[in-house]
Image (tube, rainbow, N blue to C red):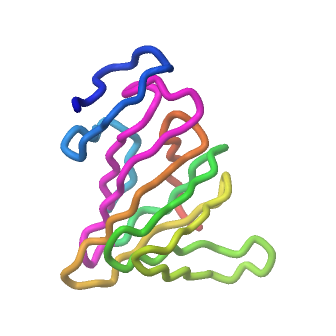
């Protein structure tokens, strides 16, 4: 079984090995995103998937993902997802564990925090657009 390579016929399945992920995608300070499935990499029409690593003791910059819905699966570590409730204005902290999922609606500013002093947080991201839309903002 071999990997897929560049974009090609939509009828072909692609295998993307973990060492083939691309760092040539939108980034936010504090975290490292790597694309696995995108329009550029495999010819995806309406999906982006990748991996994000948040090092120990780091918080990301505040950001949102434009029109894209985002699904997040926590692989390892204990990331915290922080956002401001649009009705109450209260800052909310979601604290998933490995195996949990987080849904991020379009245009909602948020950040990721990793309070662990020694363990990176690793998540798998799926987006409803074929590219990783990232809009870095100055606050929640």
| Residue 70 point in image, percent of width and height | 57, 54
Residue at point 60% right, 43% down?
128
First to last magenta residue range: 31-58
Kindly indicate the quadrant of the structure image that contains residue 139: bottom right
Point out the residue furthest to the top here. Answer: 9
Q: Image check: 4 left or right of 86?
A: left
Of 79 and 86, the residue lying toward us: 79
Count of numbered labels shown in the rendering: 0
User: What is the quadrant of the C terminus in the image?
Assistant: bottom right
Is-magenta flag for residue 135? Answer: no
| Residue 66 point in image, percent of width and height | 62, 45
Is-magenta flag for residue 35? Answer: yes
Of 95 and 63, the residue lying toward us: 95
Q: Image check: 3 left or right of 46?
A: left
Vertical placement of residue 98 versus 61, above or below = below
Vertical placement of residue 40 versus 35, above or below = above
Residue at point 61% right, 61% down?
104
Residue at point 56% right, 27% down?
45
Vertical placement of residue 59 versus 106, above or below = below
Q: Image check: 16 left or right of 96?
A: left
Of 72 and 133, the residue lying toward us: 72
Residue at point 28% right, 23% down?
5
Point out the residue furthest to the front here. Answer: 1
């Amino acid at each position: 079984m071999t990997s897929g390579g560049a974009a090609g016929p939509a009828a072909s399945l692609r295998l993307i090995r973990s060492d083939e992920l691309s760092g040539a995608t939108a980034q936010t300070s504090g975290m490292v995103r790597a694309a696995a499935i995108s329009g550029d990499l495999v010819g995806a029409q309406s999906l982006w998937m990748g991996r994000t690593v948040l090092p120990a003791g780091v918080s990301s910059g505040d950001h949102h993902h434009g029109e894209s819905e985002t699904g997040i699966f926590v692989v390892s570590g204990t990331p915290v997802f922080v956002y401001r409730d649009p009705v109450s204005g209260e800052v909310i902290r979601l604290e998933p564990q490995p195996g949990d999922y987080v849904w991020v609606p379009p245009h909602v500013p948020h950040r990721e925090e990793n309070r662990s002093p020694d363990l990176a947080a690793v998540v798998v991201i799926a987006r409803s657009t074929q590219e990783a839309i990232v809009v870095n903002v100055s606050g929640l």
